[in-house]
Amino acid sequence: MFATLVAANILSPWIGSLCSRHGPKLMVSFGLALAGVALILLRLPHDSTTGAQAVMSLLLLTIGLGYSFSATPLLMEIDFTVSDLERDTPGIFGNGGAIGLAVCNLSSFILYGLCLDL
């Protein structure tokens, strides 16, 4: 059932092209709003019937789609920002590379947020 959260990542290349055309702010806003509404609606399925499980799967797919709409443009913006900083002041991030450090920080913040939520 939780594979539906990841299934929407198939659309990430298409979302990236939309982001290049329309800008990242619109995509991130849409993705967060979509995921937020789906998270609120997660309280609807309350029994273990087939219909409730179908609603739960659809809501999890919607959350995954919202995450794809928000994560893809955010990672693109991280890449653009870090590349500009590295171009302006070479070697500011050390020998390891700027992209790895930035994505590691983003992943750490997401992990901390998930752990604090528990």
Image (spheres, rainbow, N blue to C red):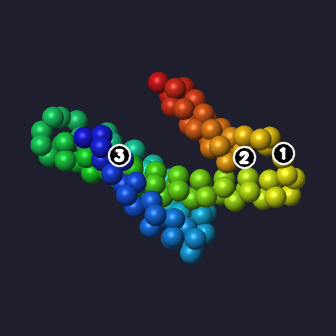
Residues 90 and 24: in front is: 90
Label whose residue precedes the other's in the sequence (2 or 3): 3
Give the quarter of the image for residue 103. top right
The residue wearing badge 2 is: 98
Rendered residue at 84%/47% (across/down): 91
Rendered residue at 57%/59% (across/down): 73
Rendered residue at 53%/56% (across/down): 72
Give coordinates of residue 58: x percent, y percent.
Answer: 27, 51
Labels 1 & 2 near each other (Cβ < 8 A): yes
Q: Residue furthest right?
A: 89
Q: Which mark is residue 5?
A: 3
**The residue tagged with tag 1: helix, strand or loop?**
loop
**Camera-side mark, 2 or 3:** 2
Give coordinates of residue 118: x percent, y percent.
Answer: 47, 24
* Left or right: 55 in relation to 78: left
Q: Which mark is residue 92?
A: 1
Q: Residues within 10 Å of mark 2 (few under 14, many from 20)?
A: many
Give coordinates of residue 55: x percent, y percent.
Answer: 23, 48
